[in-house]
């Protein structure tokens, strides 16, 4: 596709950019897997976990195009949806309890009587001031340019997989319908990620960690979410990496294996 629409220099630049994006995303997957394994096992040796994760996942990169392993995409999407449910549920539970274990600064704990009086002025006269329970009040810092750049980079990373679209389109039986599939994919990404992002930030403020899982209080729900995220990463890796591997197979004239 690039070869038909670009000069040779732009062709090389686009290929290098795509390969760096896909292999870079694969590296991030390995790092995240090592973090989750360290969290689940309590063995804080991320370097060792990265080596083990790479060794275990390498056979998955020997698979063919996405059409040869399409069920993994279904598993990855299902895991993402379940993670969203777990995160939203546990965030609500943590905020309701008034305890955010991972938050050392930013959010404030206030007397619940004052909080209710602020939220319900008409009932302020009927609220006792000696209530000892506390409520969590998120703190929202002023936006900064560096924060914008970081958020933009994170958002772009979420779309790293779009570099595999030409490979997926080449595998489809009816290529004319690919544009509708791509539009539905972007819509699904919006439906999955935006509500999760908005709810957790509005609930936790600057107590929200870069990795939302790290913000959740340790418990069964967080462990389930970590396992589901690991499942998502493992099943997504072949889709991301194999598209780049296919380019080098074609480059070196490696014949595909016979089925």
Image: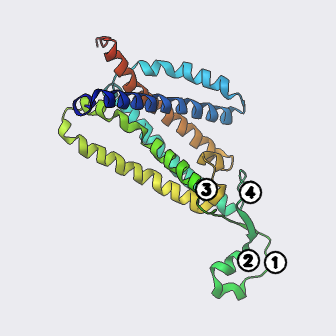
Q: Look at mark 4 in the image and give the residue it sits on.
A: 105
Q: Earlier in the sequence, mark 1 or mark 2?
A: 2
Left or right for 88, reference 71: right
For residue 125, above or below residue 180: below
Q: Residue at x 62, y 60 (%)?
A: 205
Q: Residues within 10 Å of mark 2 (few under 14, many from 20)?
A: many
Where, by quadrant of the figure, is residue 17 drawn?
Answer: top left
Q: Disc 1 vs disc 2: Cβ atoms closer than 8 Å?
A: yes
Q: Earlier in the sequence, mark 2 or mark 4?
A: 4
Q: Disc 3 vs disc 1: Cβ atoms closer than 8 Å?
A: no
Marks 3/1: CA distance? 27 Å
Q: Look at mark 3 in the image and give the residue it sits on.
A: 91
- Looking at the rendered structure, which numbered label has been put on residue 130? 1
Q: Earlier in the sequence, mark 4 or mark 3?
A: 3
- Looking at the rendered structure, which numbered label has been put on residue 113? 2
Callout 3 secondary element: helix
Q: Earlier in the sequence, mark 4 or mark 1?
A: 4
């Amino acid at each position: 596709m690039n070869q038909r629409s670009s000069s040779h220099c732009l062709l090389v630049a686009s290929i290098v950019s795509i390969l760096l994006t896909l292999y870079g995303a694969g590296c991030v997957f390995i790092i995240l897997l090592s973090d989750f394994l360290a969290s689940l096992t309590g063995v804080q040796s991320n370097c060792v976990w990265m080596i083990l994760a790479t060794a275990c996942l390498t056979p998955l990169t020997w698979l063919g195009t996405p059409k040869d392993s399409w069920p993994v995409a279904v598993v990855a999407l299902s895991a993402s949806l379940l993670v969203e449910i777990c995160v939203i549920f546990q965030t609500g539970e943590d905020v309701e309890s008034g305890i955010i274990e991972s938050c050392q600064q930013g959010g404030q704990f206030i007397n619940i009587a004052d909080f209710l009086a602020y939220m319900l002025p008409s009932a302020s006269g009927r609220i006792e001031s000696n209530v000892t329970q506390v409520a969590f009040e998120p703190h929202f810092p002023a936006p900064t340019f560096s924060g914008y750049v970081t958020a933009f980079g994170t958002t772009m990373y979420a779309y790293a997989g779009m570099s595999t679209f030409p490979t997926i389109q080449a595998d489809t039986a009816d290529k004319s319908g690919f544009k509708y599939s791509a539009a539905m994919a972007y819509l699904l990404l919006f439906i999955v990620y935006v509500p999760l992002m908005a709810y957790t930030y509005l609930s936790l403020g600057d107590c929200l960690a870069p990795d939302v899982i790290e913000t959740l209080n340790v418990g069964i729900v967080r462990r389930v979410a970590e396992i589901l995220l690991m499942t998502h990463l493992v099943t997504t890796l072949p889709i991301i990496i194999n598209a780049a591997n296919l380019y080098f197979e074609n480059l070196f004239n490696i014949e595909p294996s016979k089925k």
